[in-house]
């Protein structure tokens, strides 16, 4: 789809990856950027050659003719910005966490639906090529019907130096990282009917939880364990790899550290390297996430061209968001939570 003019709102830590990816997608130009911080505007604008810079989103919507807007701010501003895009009939991508509450998220989805405006959540982990490789094996039928999964992200990496606000919120690992791992569980094993959770705070210097273990029942009959930690010190740091174990009626899939994929199934055992490509602007160890940013943004452009709903549409993301809310509720009550009740 040629000639798309987009704008970026929010020029912080992660938005630079989005700008690199937009620059690589054929037929897309980011024609304007917006941030309340003039220095961040200057840095991103100068780096990517964007001359039209705004400190007020309403002024930008009034002045620009846009085909889409990419909201890359922190969560507290998302609802106002998404609803502003809807009012201006501009398709919108929103960074995760999508909203402060499930109620806000539902309102944002409704606003865009009522306006006839496409809405996608930048839920990019499922777009990492190793995760896509696991999905492809499932789709091939090689391991039969999956009945168990473990999706794991355990690390001791210092995420706070680059994003210091992560240390100050009452919610941390489930909201910031776990949402991705929960989305991968949905992507691989289908929607969830109920879950239970346990959370801990190991690092005394942060306000929120940095360890979470979540047990889920999937509507299709599978059981999964999602486990996340930023308090796990290992001999070889796996950040930012997601490790996956899937057991099926006819075999197993193991995505191990170092992007080693082992499939034992109907055709025997096959071991392959599913390392993500290192894009020219990417850097290790972030390259798997950076590659997924390019992939999800290309998906958005393809969906705008075809009129299809994005895989991580706002409506779809409500189902992942509900898992986040359920995990916090279950962690507090130590009782199972039914997901359907949250989505009504």
Image (cartoon, grey):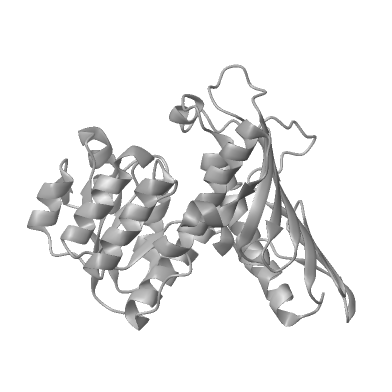
Residue at coordinates 48% horizontally, 69% vertically from top-left?
Answer: 311
Q: What residue sits 41% from the left and 43% below the top?
A: 101
**Of 76 and 65, the residue lying toward us:** 76
Q: Quadrant of residue 44?
A: top left
In the drawing, does residue 30 fall left or right of residue 270? left
Q: Looking at the image, which residue sits at the far top?
A: 204
Residue 212, image x and y in percent?
67, 37
Question: Residue 322: horizontal and vertical position, in percent?
Answer: 52, 51
Residue 157, visible in the rendered structure:
no
- The vertical placement of 159 against 123, above or below, is above
Quarter of the picture containing the N terminus is: bottom left
Instruction: Let me know if residue 237 appears in the view.
Output: yes
Return the residue found at the far left: 63
Q: Residue at x 61, y 63 (%)?
A: 191
Outermost right residue: 268
In terms of depth relative to the viewer, which is nearer, 235 or 337? Answer: 337
- From this view, report whether residue 192 is shown above or below residue 73: below
Observer-nearest of 155 and 321: 321
């Amino acid at each position: 789809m040629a000639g798309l003019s987009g704008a970026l709102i929010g020029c912080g830590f992660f938005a630079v990856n989005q700008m690199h990816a937009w620059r690589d997608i054929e037929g897309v130009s980011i024609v304007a950027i917006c941030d309340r911080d003039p220095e961040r505007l200057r840095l991103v604008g100068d780096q990517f050659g964007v001359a039209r810079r705004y400190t007020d989103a309403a002024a930008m919507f009034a002045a620009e003719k846009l085909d889409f807007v990419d909201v890359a701010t922190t969560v507290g501003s998302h609802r106002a910005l998404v609803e502003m895009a809807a009012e201006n009939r501009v398709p919108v991508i929103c960074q995760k966490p999508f909203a402060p509450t499930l109620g806000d998220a539902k309102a944002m989805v409704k606003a865009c639906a009522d306006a006839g405006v496409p809405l996608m959540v930048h839920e990019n982990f499922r777009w990492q090529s190793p995760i896509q490789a696991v999905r492809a094996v499932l789709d091939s039928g090689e391991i039969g019907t999956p009945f168990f999964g473990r999706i794991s992200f355990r690390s001791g990496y210092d995420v706070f130096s680059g994003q210091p606000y992560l240390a100050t919120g009452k919610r941390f690992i489930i909201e910031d990282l776990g949402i991705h791992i929960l989305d991968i569980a949905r992507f691989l094993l289908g929607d969830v009917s109920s879950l239970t959770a346990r959370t801990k705070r190991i690092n005394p210097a942060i306000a929120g939880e940095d360890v979470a273990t979540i047990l889920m029942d999937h509507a299709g009959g599978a059981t999964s364990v999602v486990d996340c930690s930023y308090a796990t010190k290992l001999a070889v740091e796996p950040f930012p790899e997601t490790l996956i174990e899937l057991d099926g009626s006819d075999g197993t899939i193991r995505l191990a550290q170092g992007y080693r994929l082992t499939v034992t199934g109907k055709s025997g055992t096959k071991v392959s390297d599913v390392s993500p490509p290192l894009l020219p602007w990417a850097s290790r160890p972030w390259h798997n996430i950076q590659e997924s940013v390019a992939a999800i943004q290309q998906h958005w452009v393809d969906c705008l061209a075809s009129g299809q709903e994005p895989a991580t549409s706002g409506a779809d993301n409500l189902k992942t968001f509900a898992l986040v809310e359920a995990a916090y509720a279950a962690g507090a009550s130590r009782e199972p939570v039914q997901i359907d009740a949250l989505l009504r």
